[in-house]
Each structure stands twice: as C-alpha cells, then as structure tokens.
C-alpha cells in the first residue's frame, strides 16, 4: 500500500495546486446551495430529499465524477509519463488504485463541504437523521462507482474531453439499460433491470439501506478498476 499512497499523495497535490479543483468546488457548492435554498423555500420541509432526487444524481455526480477523473490517466498518456510509471517499480493496479483514491478523496472533500445543508435543516426544523445518513451514504457510493467508471474511461484515451465523453456515455448506458427489460426474456430482463445506476441510489434517498444496492455499487467499483488495470497493462505491449 506504500506505493498506492505515494501515487494518491502525488495526485492530490496536483489537484490542489491547480485552480480547476477550486473552480469546480465553487461551482458545485454554489449550485447545490442554490438548489437547496430553492427547494427548502418552496417545499417548506426540513428535508434534502428533493435535492438528492433531482439535482445530485445526473447533473452533479455524473459531471463532477468525470471532471475529477478525466485527466488521471489520459494526461499521463498524452505527456508520455505513463510509460515512466509503468517502467518504475510500481504494479499496474497500484497506479490505478492510487489515482482512484485521489479522485475519491477529492470527491469526499466536496461532499463534506455540503455539511451546511443538514446543519441548516437542524436550525429550521427537525429533519429525519436516518434519511439524511442513508442519502449521503448512497451519494458517496454512487459517486465512488462513477469515479471508477471515469478512471476506466481515462485509461482508454489520451484526450481528457474524450475520456469525459466515454465516462458519461457508460453512465448513460447503465442508466437507460432498464428500458430493454421488456424486449428480452424474463431471465435476461431481470439482469438488465438490476443495472440502472440511479435506481439503486433512489432507495438510499428514501431512507432504505439495502445490501443489494451496496453490493451493486461496490461491484461497479471493482469491475471498472479491474478493467482500468487491464487497459493500463495493455500499454506495456504497445
């Protein structure tokens, strides 16, 4: 894990030495705060349900996850530094995991900054703590899964924009996969009905913590980090 943590620290320094991290965080917090204030004013309810239901899944988690990951491996390939990493005493999975953990740390820092939302709810009302906890848990798990998708997308190309497009495309495919359940047999349909990435999050937003949903997001993380590792491995033979 020593090598993994070294990669993570290196990427975190790169994040916070760049103005991009601060710009993205400022925009993220401004829009989250604006949407939170709007929904609180019009719903008159001490809840973040409408924020989690409408704002966070598609707009913020998709876009933020790809912004945080699109440069991780794509930029290394563009600059030719990925080859240096691969020839150093580092395993491929250590490179991938280190970069993933850096993006996850950046994402968690941004999520932590939204703590003012539940604090505001406790000042103006009596929010359901259980629902808040499950919503944030689902948000973190979904974001972590999308970051893994972004790392995989970044491993496929040298272009950061192309990486973001690929990552968003994979997420959209997972989102819409449930639409084909009626077009296939019942056994295959059950599989496709399990794939929609936002459906599992909505259960958390309703206050329901199901191990099936947790396993789903953890499985996505493992699968896409494995695919990213195999993609990086293939660079050794080019």
Image: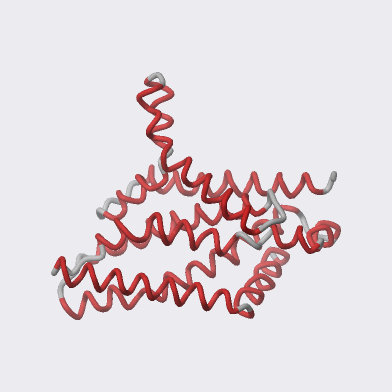
Residue drawn at x 74%, y 53% is 92
Residue 114, x across and y down, in percent = 37, 74
Horizontal side, residue 167 vs residue 134: left or right: right
Horizontal side, residue 122 vs residue 158: left or right: left
Q: Is 71 above or below relative to 229? A: below
Horizontal side, residue 1 vs residue 111: left or right: right
Residue drawn at x 39%, y 59% is 139
Q: Is 39 above or below relative to 16? A: above
Residue 80, x across and y down, in percent = 82, 61
Residue 136, x across and y down, in percent = 35, 62
> For residue 32, what is the image quadrant?
bottom left
Residue drawn at x 33%, y 74% is 33
Instruction: Give the number of marks.
Output: 0
Q: Quadrant of the C terminus?
A: top right
Residue drawn at x 79%, y 48% is 235
Q: Quadrant of the N terminus?
A: bottom right
């Amino acid at each position: 894990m020593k090598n993994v943590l070294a990669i993570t620290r290196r990427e975190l320094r790169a994040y916070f030495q760049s103005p991009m991290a601060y710009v993205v965080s400022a925009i993220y917090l401004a829009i989250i705060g604006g949407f939170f204030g709007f929904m609180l004013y019009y719903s008159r309810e001490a809840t973040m349900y409408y924020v989690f239901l409408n704002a966070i899944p598609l707009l913020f988690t998709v876009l933020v996850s790809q912004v945080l990951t699109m440069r991780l491996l794509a930029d290394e390939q563009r600059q030719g530094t990925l080859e240096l990493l691969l020839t150093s005493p580092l395993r491929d999975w250590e490179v991938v995991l280190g970069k993933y953990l850096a993006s996850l740390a950046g994402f968690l820092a941004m999520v932590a900054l939204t703590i003012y939302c539940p604090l505001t709810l406790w000042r103006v009302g009596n929010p359901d703590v259980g629902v808040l906890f499950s919503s944030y848990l689902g948000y973190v798990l979904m974001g972590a899964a999308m970051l893994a998708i972004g790392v995989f997308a970044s491993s496929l190309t040298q272009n950061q924009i192309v990486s973001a497009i690929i990552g968003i495309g994979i997420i959209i495919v997972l989102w819409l996969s449930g639409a084909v359940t009626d077009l296939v047999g019942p056994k295959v349909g059950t599989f496709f009905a399990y794939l929609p990435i936002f459906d599992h999050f909505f259960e958390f937003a309703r206050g329901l913590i199901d191990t099936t949903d947790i396993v789903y997001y953890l499985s996505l993380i493992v699968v896409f980090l494995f695919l990213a590792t195999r993609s990086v491995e293939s660079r050794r033979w080019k």
